[in-house]
Image: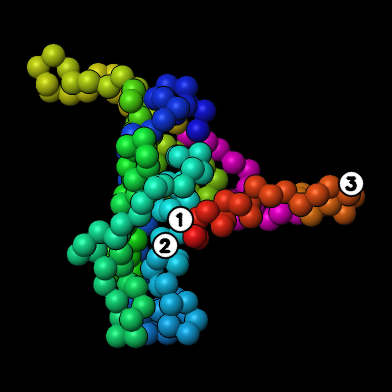
């Protein structure tokens, strides 16, 4: 986040986020995410939340002015549960974002943020390719070479190593928050409930 804010701009102009996976026949018939009485939002309530949260992260959790379903992206199963959908989000200051989520497409977890002077791109924003590291690319003040045969400067690839997978980090953070309440009498941290509410409203 710091890299993007420092080199691209504090305001993004465009975000694109996608989380799709090709569900098995068994999943499409039996999983709770395709049952209207268990999780009627289907792909939106599963894969879509990741896309929405990534977009809100780029917008510093400022809610958009309007959200509109993208025509032609919606598919449902026989019970009416969403199997795929897409949407566009617009802010008053003309920022725009789009997302697509689906149970019917090859595994994709792309996230791209474009600012006035830079672009951040992540190919594995939901589950990293490797559990002990994550990679993203960043480009700033990009342009074509003189004969338009390449880019200058090239995007920078950045690797972030971790000693624990993200699921363990989540449990560790939750335990830290609970321990602070028990040991120090701290108040519950409102950051995560607020972000969760904004993601799902």
Label pair 2/1, CB-CB below 8 angstroms: yes
Vertical position of residue 62 compared to residue 82: above or below: above
Highlighted magenta segment, given as a residue range: 159-175
Q: Nearer the viewer, residue 37 or 90?
A: 90
Circle 3 SS class: helix
Residue lying farthest top?
146
Left or right: 198, with 125 as reference point = right
**Residue picked out by circle 1:** 50
Q: Which residue is mark 3?
A: 184
Q: Is residue 122 above or below residue 149?
A: below
- Tell me if residue 136 can be seen: yes
Inter-mark Cα distance, 3 to 1: 33 Å
At label 2, counting other C-alpha atoms closer than 10 Å, the crowd grade (few under 14, some 14-19, many 20 or more) is many
Which badge, 3 or 2, is on the more N-terminal residue? 2
Residue 145 locus on image (x, y percent): 17, 17
- Tell me which residue sits at (36%, 51%) in the image: 66
| Residue plotted at (79% across, 54% down) | 178
Residue on which disc 2 sits: 47
Question: Does residue 69 appear to the left or right of 53 in the view shown?
Answer: left
Quarter-of-image position of residue 101: bottom left
């Amino acid at each position: 986040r710091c890299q993007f804010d420092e080199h691209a701009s504090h305001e993004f102009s465009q975000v694109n986020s996608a989380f799709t996976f090709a569900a098995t026949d068994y999943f499409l018939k039996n999983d709770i995410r395709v049952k209207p009485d268990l999780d009627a939002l289907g792909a939106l309530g599963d894969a879509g939340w990741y896309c929405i949260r990534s977009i809100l992260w780029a917008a510093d959790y400022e809610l958009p002015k309007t959200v509109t379903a993208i025509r032609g992206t919606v598919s449902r199963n026989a019970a009416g549960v969403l199997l795929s959908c897409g949407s566009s989000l617009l802010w008053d200051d003309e920022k725009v974002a789009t997302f697509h989520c689906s149970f019917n497409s090859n595994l994709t977890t792309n996230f791209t943020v474009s600012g006035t002077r830079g672009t951040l791109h992540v190919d594995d924003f939901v589950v990293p390719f490797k559990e002990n590291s994550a990679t993203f690319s960043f480009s700033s003040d990009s342009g074509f070479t003189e004969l338009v045969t390449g880019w200058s400067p090239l995007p920078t690839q950045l690797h972030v190593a971790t000693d624990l997978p993200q699921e363990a980090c989540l449990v560790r953070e939750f335990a830290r928050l609970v321990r602070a309440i028990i040991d120090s009498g701290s108040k519950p941290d409102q950051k995560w409930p607020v972000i969760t509410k904004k993601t799902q409203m």
